[in-house]
Amino acid sequence: MVPVATLPAAAILMGIGYWIDPNGWGANSALAAFLIKAGAAIIDNMSVLFAIGVAYGMSKDKDGAAALSGFVGFLVVTTLLSPGAVAQIQGIDASAVPAAFAKINNQFVGILVGIVSAEIYNRFSHVELHKALAFFSGKRLVPILTSFAGILIAFVLMYIWPSVYNGLVSFGEGIQGMGEVGAGLYAFFNRLLIPVGLHHALNSVFWFDVAGINDIPNFLGGAKSIAEGTATVGVTGMYQAGFFPIMMFGLPGAALAMYHTAKAKNKEKVASIMIAAGFASFFTGVTEPLEFAFMFLAPALYVVHALLAGISVYIAASMQWIAGFGFSAGLVDMVLSTRNPLAVNWYMLIVQGFVFFALYYFIFRTVIIKFNLKTPGREDDDAEEGAAQGSKETGELAKQYLKALGGHENLENIDACITRLRLTLKDSSLADEKQLKALGAMGVVKLGSNNLQVILGPLAEIVAGEMKKIPASEDLSAVKLP
């Protein structure tokens, strides 16, 4: 999520630029051109931002040396796999170089290099060399090792990248060939993969230039994309537009249904959760706090949500109601995209949104009541005991979460993305899921025997940072849990 977090900057810069000069797209205003070009600088370099951001984000202590290593590794790999270099290394004519190498500068490679760079940093950033080579010890060693790893990656990719690339392109073209139905299928699986966080992998195929679709950058490119032939009015943005009715209206409708169906004694508590989660979904497009509120309590309802998301994206694509986003399908991105020349009948997404608000509300309310689903506020009384929130102060809250996870001695790694604590535990049985939820966690996801994700919403990164600050020697016995 670190590189993805740069997209709002591009969206804001380009969005304001299009607002200033909606017809000339920079031709009639130096300020508009300045802003649009500045935003394009981010969009046009997303692949290297992925290499840097993933390396930084996955390093154990978020150090700049990891980010530098990601950049070094990306330069090595993409230089060695450029068409000219491949022709020279393999001793073949430039015209015989597979077309896949013309697309080596992509987010897929950036993510791969970032992961390898982070792993090298985590393993070797504290290595001490012989005194004669002491200058290159520790963090200075990491970019050197990454450059050699880049050579190895390039050697392997030189033989397998054409097959991998062709497979990704075939997959993308298969979905593209299905038109609006394909867009709907993509949205359905996008939602289904959220519980394990693998929706990011799927998104990279459709939203970025992994398989030639590149929906987000092409949309944000606006007039430039149209002029270059990489965008088509009414088509580009089809993998984004239908999410606006879901995130801005549908899920808040579901939140209202869950509030109305909660037990009377729990309504106040449920209201506070649903208002915060619903506002985040409507305003920013961050949906995980709301989705995790019912994802595991009522999985059948979550499948209904995924189906409705697929239908929404299908409808928007079919009707060519198009808007795009730089971060997610919330109000901020909708406003910014309205003057983009690729935004077509964007206001109809609001009309569609009101319809989906009603659909979500009545479907969720009916299903919850008919099947007596244990959505928030409807849990059995024994499950509600101790369901108080944790401390309001994040430092104290971090201690409470740490204690509920078994203490520092049970944690091998603490990380976070926008909404989740991502943890590696020595003994997962020591993590008290009931206490974690009592502290305010909206969900707990177990991945394998030692990896755990705790869904906290926007507080996740703050809590993770505070947890890391707690000394390993600090006694947590006095910390009170709900």
Image: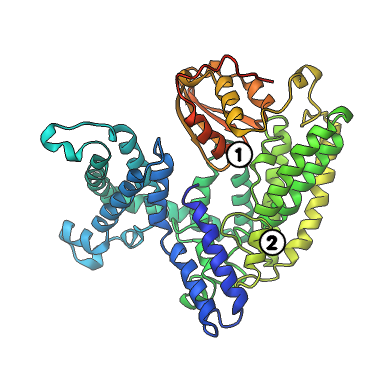
Left or right of residue 253: residue 448:
left
Residue at 86%, 33% in the rendered image: 369
Residue 108 seen: no
Residue at 51%, 72% in the rendered image: 36
Q: Amino acid at mark 1?
A: Leu
Up the image or down, 208 lies above or below 340; here it is: above
Whether the residues at callouts 2 and 1 have beta carbons within 8 Å, the answer is: no
Q: In front: 344, or 432?
A: 432
Q: Residue furthest top?
A: 477
Helix, strand or loop at label 1? It is helix
Q: In front: 300, or 176?
A: 300
Q: Amino acid at mark 2?
A: Ala
Q: Residue 235 at what x, y percent from top left?
A: 59, 67
The residue under label 1 is 459
Up the image or down, 320 lies above or below 223; here it is: above
Work out which quarter of the rendered image holds the C terminus and state it: top right
Q: Residue 242 at what x, y percent from top left?
A: 67, 57
Helix, strand or loop at label 2? It is helix
The residue under label 2 is 316
